[in-house]
């Protein structure tokens, strides 16, 4: 045991104290030795309690082991877009009537090819049963637009179709959300493939017709404004798509109808759907109801299978179309 530091200093500073302390230590040691000549009494031994035996853990035969449940790793977005996959022989070779009969026989409401290598493989979607009526949002449409109630409403409650009274066209709802834009391992102008989010918008069900553009041109002439340029095919079938239209005239027509040109991203989503299809009908070769040649111009909506998942026609054929933004 160590002494306090101040006491050590006192002892070291006096020689007489050191000598006296030595004598006391020696004498006390001798006296203790004389008094302790008898053998010391042994200390009583304390009996340690015996260790408690630990019972061996044995599995209860009545308790069944829980099996590990393996669940598919699907995100919520994947679960919202899963469909029942069915295979029909020579599906791509069926005509429109045969397809309709097959869909009715299997209670299917839509079918889209899903494989480039197997045109007979496709996705079949069944009707979604809802527990109650779809809520209808009170939409305040711009002037000269009206709701088409028989077309129904989407899950958010917005009308699937509206009617433009000025140019007498139906507009299709493209709901908000993420879609796949671009494509890898294709033309470098289309790469890279990436995700893009867009708000909801409406787009014309088909291309602007010759009849609609000529009506717009006459309207501008009556107002004594700068007359839009003549179409390259102004004497064609009035239901053919308008061709040879300048970009400025396309913007003017859109404003005349109370609309605007779609952006490139909006046009692509309306054409390819959310899943980035190669074509409006999906993947693989198209199942035309009748022959169609490259560069062929036909009346709008002449090919029902040239229809995007949102219901927009002629996104793969007929005339090329203007967008609001420039290519870069």
Image (tube, rainbow, N blue to C red):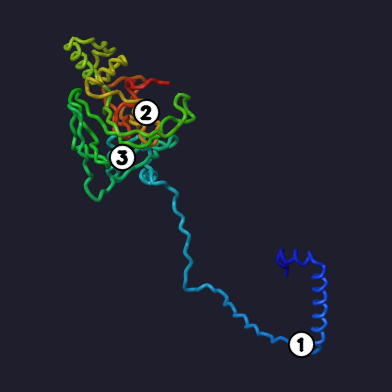
Q: CA distance from mark 3 to mark 2?
A: 25 Å
Is residue 91 found left or right of 158 in the rendered image? Answer: right
Is residue 81 found left or right of 172 in the rendered image? Answer: right
Task: Tell me where residue 199 appears, x and y as whole percent.
Answer: 32, 34
Quarter residue 200 falls in:
top left
Question: Between residues 167 and 32, which one lies in front from this camera angle?
Answer: 32
Quarter residue 234 falls in:
top left
Residue at 27% in and 30% down: 202
Residue pointed to by mark 2: 265
User: How would you rate the neighbour count of disc 1 (Cα within 10 Å): few for under 14, some for 14-19, many for 20 or more?
Assistant: few
Q: Secondary structure at mark 3?
A: strand
N-terminal of the pair, mark 1 or mark 3, is 1
Q: Secondary structure at mark 1?
A: loop
Q: Is residue 254 above or below residue 134?
A: above
Judged from this view, the residue extending furthest toward the bottom is 38
- Between disc 1 and disc 3, the foreground one is 1
**Residue 85 visible somewhere in the drawing:** no
Task: Tell me where residue 123 appears, x and y as whole percent.
Answer: 36, 41
Q: CA distance from mark 1 to mark 2?
A: 103 Å
Task: Tell me where residue 169 appears, x and y as whole percent.
Answer: 21, 26
Residue pointed to by mark 1: 40
Residue at 45% in and 49% down: 73
| For the residues bearing labels 3 and 2, Cβ distance under 8 angstroms | no
N-terminal of the pair, mark 1 or mark 2, is 1
Q: Is residue 209 above or below residue 58?
A: above
Q: Which image quarter is the N terminus in?
A: bottom right
User: How would you rate the neighbour count of disc 2 (Cα within 10 Å): few for under 14, some for 14-19, many for 20 or more?
Assistant: some
User: How would you rate the neighbour count of disc 3 (Cα within 10 Å): few for under 14, some for 14-19, many for 20 or more?
Assistant: some
Residue pointed to by mark 3: 110
Q: Secondary structure at mark 2?
A: helix
| For the residues bearing labels 1 and 3, Cβ distance under 8 angstroms | no
């Amino acid at each position: 045991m160590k002494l306090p530091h101040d006491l050590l200093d006192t002892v070291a500073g006096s020689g007489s104290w050191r000598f006296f302390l030595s004598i006391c230590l020696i004498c006390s040691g001798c006296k203790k030795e004389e008094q302790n000549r008898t053998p010391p009494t042994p200390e009583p031994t304390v009996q340690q309690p015996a260790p408690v035996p630990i019972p061996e853990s044995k599995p209860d035969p009545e308790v069944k082991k829980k099996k590990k449940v393996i669940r598919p790793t699907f995100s919520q977005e994947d679960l919202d877009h899963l469909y029942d996959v069915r295979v029909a022989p020579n599906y791509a070779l069926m005509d429109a009537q045969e397809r309709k009969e097959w869909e009715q026989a299997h209670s299917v409401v839509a079918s889209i090819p899903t494989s480039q290598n197997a045109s007979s493989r496709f996705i079949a979607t069944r009707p979604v049963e809802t527990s109650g009526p779809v809520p209808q949002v009170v939409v305040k449409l711009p002037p000269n637009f009206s709701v088409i109630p028989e077309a129904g409403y989407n899950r958010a409650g917005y009308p699937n179709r509206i009617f433009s009274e000025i140019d007498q066209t139906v507009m299709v709802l493209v709901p908000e959300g993420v879609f796949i834009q671009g494509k890898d391992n294709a033309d470098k102008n289309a790469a890279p493939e990436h995700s893009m989010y867009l708000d909801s918008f409406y787009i014309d069900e088909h291309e602007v017709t010759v009849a609609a553009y000529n009506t717009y041109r006459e309207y501008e002439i009556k107002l004594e404004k700068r007359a839009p340029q003549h179409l390259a095919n102004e004497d064609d079938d009035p239901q053919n798509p308008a061709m040879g239209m300048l970009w400025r005239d396309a913007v003017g027509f859109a404003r005349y109808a109370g609309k605007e040109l779609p952006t490139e991203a909006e046009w692509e989503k309306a054409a390819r759907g959310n899943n980035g299809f190669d074509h409006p009908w999906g993947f693989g070769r198209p199942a035309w109801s009748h022959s169609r040649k490259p560069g062929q111009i036909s009346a709008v909506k002449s090919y029902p299978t040239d229809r995007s998942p949102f219901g927009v026609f002629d996104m793969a054929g007929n005339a090329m179309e203007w967008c609001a933004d420039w290519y870069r």
